[in-house]
Image (cartoon, coloured by chain):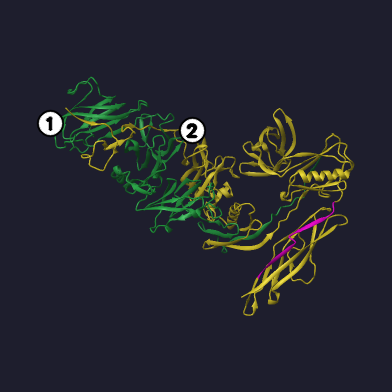
Chain colours: A yellow, B green
Amino acid sequence: MRYVVLENFKFGLDSRRLALSSQPGTLVKLENAHITPGGEVEKRKAFVPLAAGGLAGTFGLEATSDGLVVFGGLPVGTSPGFTGTASLPPGVSYIPVIHPYPYCFGWGFYSATVHALQSVVFSRNYNGKAFVAAKFVDGNTFLYYGTGTVSGFGTVPIATLILQSSAGIVVPKSPTTPMTPSDMATLLAKQAATLGAGWNAQATGGGTVILTSPSGEYFEPVTTVNSSVGALASTLVGYDFVGNSVPAYLSATNHGFGLSSVPSATVCMAASYYPQKTSLQSLGRWQTSGTTFNFYLNPSETLYPVASNIVRISGTAFHPGAYKVIGSGFDSHGKYFTIGVSGSSGDYTADTTGYFELLYAFCVDESFNVTGATTTTVAAAMAAVINQNIIGYTAQSSNYSVFPLANPEWGDFRGYFEIFNSGGASLPLTAAGTLNLTATVKPTSLTTGGQVIWSGGVITPKKFTSGNVTVSPSGGTMGTGYKFQWRAKVSGTPIVVNNPTGATTSFSLTVATAAGAGTTTAVYICTVTDNAAVPNTVTVQVTVIFTIGIGV
Amino acid sequence: MSEYTFTGGGAYAAPYGQEQVFQFLATAGTTWDNGDTWQIDSAADQGDFMLGAGWVAGINPVYGLALAERMYICAGSQFNFSDNNDPSSWEEQNPGAGYVDLLSNYGIQDTTMSLATYQGMLAVLMQQTIQIWVPNADPTQMVLRQVLSNIGTVASYSVQSLGDWDVVFLSQTGFRSLRVRDSSLNALIVDLGTPIDAIVQNALLGYIPGTTPAPVSIVDPGTGRYWCFLNDTFYVLSYYPNSKITAWNTYLPTFASGENQVSFVPTQIIVYKGRVYVRGTASGTDYVFLYGGASNNVYDKCVATVQTPWLPAKKPSSNKIAFGVDLALRGTWSVSVCMDPTVVNPFSNPGTQVAKLSGSTYDASTPDGIQPGQSGLIALPGRGTHFAFFAQCSDDTPGPNNPVLSALTLVFEGADVS
């Protein structure tokens, strides 16, 4: 007897030689089986469906820290949103990937003809989140990373657009209309806002964007356009602006409060802090009750809602100020705030699937004890406590009066300042006296200049404009507002005040002849008047210098 | 208690260094067109920046890779990389971001197809060239390490790193790999897929990019096997250097639907928690499949097929008289043997089946010189110059009793031997 023994199949499939002359250990066919480390043939395992179907309208597949995900071009629950999430295979979730135009301008602009997701070119897991290259039916491919909530798309996270991948490209607004210059300006402002701290960009309508850099940062933009009809203009407006502000104060008439006598017990003060914008959902939960609802803070929460400017979001509709805090209390569920409909602008009962967002509404309060022998010392002590302990507030005292001011950077802040007697008795409060009117101006000098062109014995007239100066008054009696009046300290100067009755102004000099060149210096005075029956005034002054050269 | 409300606040205007106004304009009566682009490239004291259509806007990336705290993408003739630790930032104002135009480093116009990690470096695979770059957190310190000419990939998603020392990819001639050549750590192209080049080249004839499904691939972390789907078949590499095994096989993408096996077209393969998930389409319906099922031990009734080449028993010109065949196996297998190498398709006729076996046939009680039909040995009457074995298995028994074909023995006498 003779034997042919095939001890293993370690060479697997091999088509290099004819089947008639291949070496032992190779195979002509090895299908649905593989070679093990021991050289054996082992049948493959099964491909087991997680579930039948359920993936219609989705693309791709990626592993993330949240599990397996697929992608689609429609948000969840927003008409005509994707409604198939309930039928997704178990363990698979859905991430909407939205075309940049509806992503940036609202789902109402979605058009399947030009904004539908066509395919996921590739996806990758980066640090547990999905990085996606998505191709849309308009032919463009854009990048997305991670997820987040976007205004107008409800509370279900959608893929976060990497704005840099879509910036600068004109995409369809609708099947028949490209995005407008105004749209482009909006997107430029969005992208510029990401440049870093101190950069600020604002689209002001009509396709215009004002971009400001941090103090001390200067830039030279060069614009490039690839369009047969479009253009992008760039104009330097000014530089070295020092900022301006109007602080918030306690009273429209006297800015503070007074003490009519020394309190019988310690005076305690509680001040609200810098406001934050936070959704109620992140801070607690609510319980409906008739025409109002009670909002219960999480036990660990140190923030609390104040009474105004609650925004209702229902679907894609925003209703600023639709609700207000109308009471508070404490029950077995914890501390709560009763929130009710403000006027007839909304009805929370229709918003069971919406959520609420408070703008400038959450504040932290701290209280401080103050004592003193006289109304003057108590007032002085209260001002000192505010200045030393309450971040963002400054205060002055004058005799029996205290004048707290909120940080001007808070803009139209409407916070609270509480004063109470620790002994429980009423406080001996009265209207504040008048704080002396004062004013500052920044900067105190402006230097600017440039060059006019001389050609053929003629100067081409040119207007030069300085940066801004801003006068910041305080004290006095504001009433309906301070008044400003700018004038030159010495008449006859060719320098012009561009906003002669405003707190903020710039200055201009027009040079039309060679004689107008050189250095022109002027001092300007601004008189600030308050609203008292017998008006108080205060003046500040600014030195303005134009240095103009002549070029050819 | 007295409660005062602050009032009178006005809009805050922050200080700034420079105020610049940009205005988008259009010729009267017109507007910009779809596809138009604009860009603001700005030199600034504290770092230049770019707004609008910069380095990643308007490109059409075909592949991405996360490597060394960055995302890398390739498009056209360049690859881009994000800022360090920030895959959302890709422009000039992002210090670690940048791009490399590969045309500036190699003279032939080529198109990037894929990216892979290779010994901690970045392998950029184009259609005709492979470049190996050394990443650096500083974009100016990115170094081109090596250029491998006249080799590339035709399928972006066929590219997989095997560990960190090898990269397997589908070239226009078959599967190839990058490997370390010597202590210099330079790479060379290895004809890893040569044994199945003829098969793959034939399959590539039917692959039309953009029309037929794109090849997709994965490395199964449980077994280390490389899978690549091309046209209608998975090509699978079992590579075990310690066992000196480099073996290819195929899987047909099918799944059990009742008693039937239904074909599907894989469109995406990923690894999640050490398991292989495949997204595929069957009859217009998309599925996500888990290879091996939840228990990683699910088998179905797909037919595993094994066919040997013609075996001459070292005497191809001599006639042999077969007595029988012994097999070491597990599970239920149908075995056929053919001894006539002139038959073009020897196993198309079911009548060639020798036996249907459920377990090995070796038997210690079987004496030497046993005659066909006796214990153990499977009778195999026949005469010819060569033997070819053919075995099939649709057994779905899970492990540890899952189907395995380990070895086989053919017993014969030489008819032409006097």
- In the figure, A23 relative to A450: above or below? above
Name the chief secondary structure element in magenta.
strand
Could you tell me which chain the residue with mark 1 belongs to?
B
Residue numbers of the magenta segment: A435-450
Does the magenta segment cover residue A120?
Answer: no
Instruction: Give coordinates of residue A240: x percent, y percent.
Output: 68, 60
Residue depth check, mark 1 versus mark 2: number of the one nearer the observer = 1
Q: Is residue B153 visible?
A: no
Name the amino acid type tagged 2.
Pro
* Residue at the spot 61% in from the left edge and 44% down from the top edge: A316
Q: Looking at the figure, which quarter contains the N terminus of chain A?
A: top left
Instruction: Give coordinates of residue A368: x percent, y percent.
Output: 79, 39
**Badge 2: few (under 14), some or many (20 or more) residues near its Cα, within 10 Å?**
few
Give B186 or B277, whichever is nearer the viewer: B186
Q: Is residue B296 visible?
A: yes
Give B68 or B356, whichever is nearer the viewer: B68
Name the amino acid type tagged 1.
Ala
Q: Kindly check if marks 1 and 2 are in contact, taking CB atoms under 8 A apart as contact.
A: no
Instruction: Give coordinates of residue B283: x percent, y percent.
Output: 39, 38
Q: Residue furthest left?
A: B418
- In the figure, B73 relative to A542: above or below? above
Could you tell me which chain the residue with mark 2 belongs to?
A
Residue topped by disc 2: A90
**Badge 1: few (under 14), some or many (20 or more) residues near its Cα, within 10 Å?**
some
Residue topped by disc 1: B415
